Image (tube, rainbow, N blue to C red):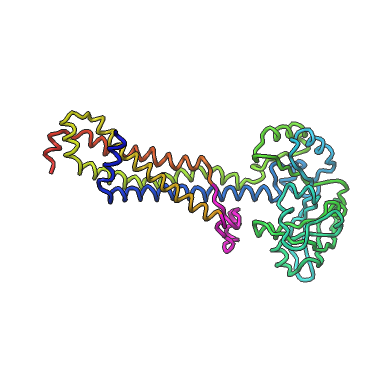
Amino acid sequence: MYFKLAWRNIWRNSRRTAIILTAVVIGVWSMVLLGSLMRGIAVGMIRNGISTLTGHIQIHHKGYRNDPAIENRIADPTVVENALKKALPEDASWTARVRVNAVASNARHSSGVTLLGIDPASEANVSFIGTAISQGRYLNPDDRNGIVIGEALMKKFDTRPGRKLVLMSQDTDGEIASRAFRIVGIFRAEMEATEKQFVFVMRQASQKMLRLGGGISEISILLPGKPDNPEVYHRLKTALPSEQFEVNDWRELLPFQTAYLRILDGFMWIWYLVVFVAMGFGIVNTTLMAVFERMREFGLLKALGMKPWWILREVLTESFLLLVTGMMIGNMLAFVCIFIMARSGIDLSALAAGAEYAGMTRVIYPAIALKDLLMSNLVVLFLGILVSAYPAVKAARFTPVEALAHT
C-alpha cells in the first residue's frame, strides 16, 4: 500500500517530479561515466606499463635499478633460471634480456636510446613487441645484425626498413663498443616516448657486441591471471639470495601508476560527494516544498488517527521511489555512453606529449569496475534518503490544528 500511494503521490505534480528526476539522473550519469573514464585511464596505464617491458615481476642483480650499468649484470643466469623452474606456475612466461643505454646514429642524426637484446620467441609472450610490428617484420633467430625500432625514432632519423643504424655503448672492459645493424622492422607502441626510447636486437648479438658472454641485465616474468601474485613473489624472494639479486613486482617497478591507483579511490569519493551536494540541495528544497503544499493533507490524516511514523514512512517511500527511478535512468544513460565510447575510445593523439607526461596512453577506453558502480549508486541512495529525512520529519510533526489553519 505504501509503495502504491507513494507512486501516485509523486506524480500529482509531474513537473516537480521531473525536476527532481533530472537532478538525480544527471548526478548518477556523471558519477558512473566519470568513474568509468578514471578507471579506464588507470587500467590503460597499468596494462601499458606491464606490457612495455615491465611484466609482473622482474629480477636484477643487486644495485642494477639504482645504477643500470653493464657492471651490475647477472653474469650467470643459471641460478635464476633454476629458481624460476621451481617457483613459477606452469603457465607463467618469462624472458631474459640485455638492457643498456646506448647511442643510435646514422649519417644525419644521433640520439640516446635503450638497447634491448631479446630472445624473440620468449619476448613475444611477455611484452608488447611481438604484436606491435607495423612495418617490415619481427626479429627471427637468423637476424644476427637485424634491429627493430619505433615509428617515432624512424621519423626522427628519416630512415626506413632496409637501412643501417649504428649503435654505440660501453662494453664490460669499459671500452666503447659499436656495431652496425640493419633495420628489419618498425614497431608502434601506445606511447610515442616508447617508440623513441627502445631498439630491439638479438640477445646473442648484443652479448657479443658488449662482450657479456652469457650475461644478462634482467629477467621479466608474466604471470597468469591477475597481476598481483604475492605467493610467487615471496617464493622467488626466498629462493634467490638477497645479497646478490633483487626481486621486484610491478608496483615497485611502476611507482607513478601505483601512486595513481592509491589516490584514485579517494578522488572518486570526493567527486561523488561534490555531485551529491549539488543534487542534495535540489532534493531537499523540492521535497520540502511538496511537504508544505500537502500540509493540510497531513493534518487531516493525523486527525483521522494516522500515526506520525506512518507519515514519515510515506514521505521517505516517495523519496526512495524517486531516487530509484532516477538511478535506473541514470545508469542506463551512462551504460549507453560507455558503450559508444568503448568502441573507438577517446583519442588523445593531439595531446600526446601532455598525456604521456602523465603516463596516459594515446587512447582512453572506459572501464567499469563493480565497486565504482555500487559506490556511486549507494552514495545517491543512502544520502538521498538521509537528506529526505528532514522534510519527512517536518511532515510528521504537523499537528491537525496547525495543518487545518494553514492557507
Q: Residue at x 67, y 47 (%)?
A: 50
Q: Is residue 357 above or below residue 322?
A: below
Left or right: 6 with respect to 359? left
Q: Which residue is drawn at 66% across and 39% down?
A: 225
Q: Where is residue 221 in the image (x, y as percent from the top left)?
A: 73, 42
Q: Is residue 118 visible?
A: no
Left or right: 85 with respect to 276? right
Highlighted magenta segment, given as a residue range: 343-367
Q: Is residue 305 above or below residue 289?
A: above
Q: Position of residue 37 (x, y in %)?
A: 52, 51
Left or right: 147 with respect to 307? right
> Is residue 32 highlighted in magenta?
no
Q: Is residue 383 above or below residue 172?
A: above
Q: Where is residue 394 in the image (x, y as percent from the top left)?
A: 23, 37
Q: Is residue 37 above or below residue 112?
A: above
Question: Which picture quadrant has residue 238?
Answer: top right
Q: Where is residue 168 in the image (x, y as percent from the top left)?
A: 81, 60
Q: Which residue is drawn at 34% across and 37% down?
A: 386
Q: Is residue 190 visible?
A: yes
Query: In this figure, what is the number of numbered marks?
Result: 0
Give the camera-side residue of 292 and 175: 292
Give the camera-side residue of 310 and 347: 310
